[in-house]
Amino acid sequence: MIDKQADVVIVGSGAGGGTVAHALAPLAREGKRILVLEQGPRLSISEFTGRELEMAPALYEDEGGFLTADGTMTLAFGRALGGSTVVYTGTSMQPPERVIRQWNVPGLAHADLDERARKYAAQNNVHFLDETELNDNNRLFVEGCRNAGYHAEQFPINVKGCRGTSLCNLGCPTGAKQGTDRVQLPEAENAGVGIVTRAEVLRIEDRAVVVRVSERPDGAKGLPSEWPAGDYRITAGTVVLAGGAVGSPALLLRSGMADLPRRVGEGFTCHPAHILVGEHPRPITNDVGHPKSFFLDRAVEEGYVLETCMYFPFTTAKNLAGFGAPHSRLMHAYPRLQMILVLGCDKAVPGNRVSVDRAGKPVVHYRFTPETIEAMVRATRASARIFFGAGAVRVHAPSADPPLIEAADANRIDELIHARHFKPGRISVSAAHLMGGCGMGRDATDSVTDSRGRVHGRPWLRVADSSLFPDSLEINPYLTIMALADRVAEGILEDAGALAPRAAGVA
Amino acid sequence: MAQVSTSRETTFGPVRDSFRAVAVTVVPEAVSLQPAEWEEVERIVERGLASRPSSIRRQLRLFVRILEILPLFRFGKTFRRLDPDRRTRFLLAIQDAPLLLLRRGFWGVRTLIYMGYYSRPAARDEIGYRATTAGWEGRL
């Protein structure tokens, strides 16, 4: 075991960790030792090929196929420098006032979060794509919504010079997406913040982390780690956990710390999602252009959000229900497919939680509540109406049996798409908005941290990622994560006088 | 259709013929795959499983064996001896089985088959998938 010292150690480099690293750059300039530990690799732009088989192992935990404990849902979360900001579509939504108010976290005001989120929206070049940059897949969603009586809204996107590769979820091959790997981390590094990739934090100790740095596997993408392979114990005045809603609670749980708040791991939510497709009679532009430019927010009224999307051949095949000739026909209609992602606004309920197995690996326990299933069924029905409203000749809906609905049956949507067909294990459900597990609140009886991410009873230990959410956000979360992380960093800066002065650089 | 192999090093090597019989039911076009293309499919599947615990790989192999044997109780024949229509009917029943274990097992096997088949460049071309790193410029 090699001993090192730092003033602040940040575990994770995504929307949370990258933001904290950037916000603490002034401390680094003053000579404080700020260190980011990232489990995944650092990739160069030329390594983003857009090919599923190559990118999934390089960018995602379990290649994007992390399964919940009962095997009925796949969770996708990034594991590379930049975390999930490398693999999202750059959709940049302000924190929703209604939800933040419902969270009812003492000391957390929507206005404060909103202002901070706006700061990061400006930093990340968030804007609406121009009309000329939209593809048919997105235009048809808007048209279908209009014809079905809904109002689609445009997503603000954080891109700079987007060339419309449509490959966002496999990492942007042109560097247009302004994730933390493109904006916050390079600036932090220039200011003297240290970054160590291929560094898996094994456990947290009292004011220290134990981390294993690995060699680059033969043939793997990415640069070798900045440190020699081996096990390290890094003592630090402050430790910030930003490993995401699965990683952060799992790390706390496997560390075996005494008197942890009992709610660690509880309150997991994830916006469970279906992919739906509508088949049009003519080819449309769908696998070129930004894939996720519009959404329909029905969270308040009906408990769901619909978003445009376009996925790659294997991901599409996996997410379509069924098999055999009907499935193949749909796959061969790929150039004519319109796609919608259905997101259920699930609620934190007892039992849906993160734990660890005997080896310390995370296990996510998740059961679909009847309310979530009903919301996803309502969302699927609405999507079918939107597809037909846009001119689709048939629609593929996972919670219909059989899943293909012809245009002639468009008036039977409510009958054909039904909760009784939502059979876990039969249909593909995935989630990429992972939230909760270290929720904010009043004290250790109802939460894990306070509104500034300080773990109750351990002022040196903070959390700065989506695990802070006490409940589902009901919209794409990354700007809210950055706003919360900004508050965490501000707290560290306020306490900076308490950090022991040391020489520059990591010892 | 399927080549007989004696390989026991891969997950599905010992049940290769059964795996391929399931695969051509899940993706009917797979019936025309040449030996080298089958090897490509199976190489992709194996690589996808490489980081999974050996217990998962054993369970998947066992599940394919179960799929091979179970039709005996319904049709009096093993899976490979069924005609395509009965194979489909049998797998539909498994897909909708009351037992989550069966539904989940089939979902896992079909997902691997889709990974092996649709991750190939030839399959991307076959379905008309055209995304490239050139984006809009590539369509000019």
Image (spheres, coloured by chain):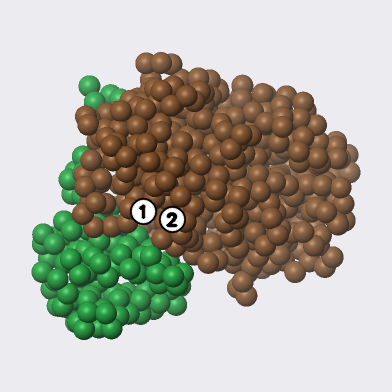
Chain colours: A brown, B green
Q: Position of residue A267 (x, y in %)?
A: 70, 54
Residue type pointed to by label 1: Asp
In space, the residues marked 1 and 2 are separated at their CA atoms by 6 Å
Viewer-proximal residue, A325 or A173?
A: A325
Amino acid type assigned to the residue bearing label 2 in the image: His
Q: Residues within 10 Å of mark 2 (few under 14, many from 20)?
A: some
Work out which residue is located at the far top of the displayed protein and give it: A131
Q: Secondary structure at mark 1?
A: loop
State the residue at coordinates (82%, 47%).
Answer: A441
Residue A304: tell me if it is visible: yes
At horizontal 32% and vertical 43% (from top left) the residue drawn is: A405
Which residue shows up at 71% across the image and 36% down it? A99
Q: Quadrant of residue B66?
A: bottom left
Q: Earlier in the sequence, mark 1 or mark 2?
A: 1
Proximity of marks 1 and 2: CB atoms separated by less than 8 Å = yes
Q: Is residue A125 left or right of residue A286?
A: right
Q: Residues within 10 Å of mark 1 (few under 14, many from 20)?
A: some
Q: Chain of mark 2?
A: A
Picture layout, residue B90 above or below residue A310: below
Query: In terms of depth relative to the viewer, which is nearer, A389 or A250?
Result: A389
Which numbered tag is attached to residue A421? 2
| Residue A401 numbered tag | 1
Give x and y (percent) for residue A291: 40, 32
Q: Secondary structure at mark 2?
A: helix
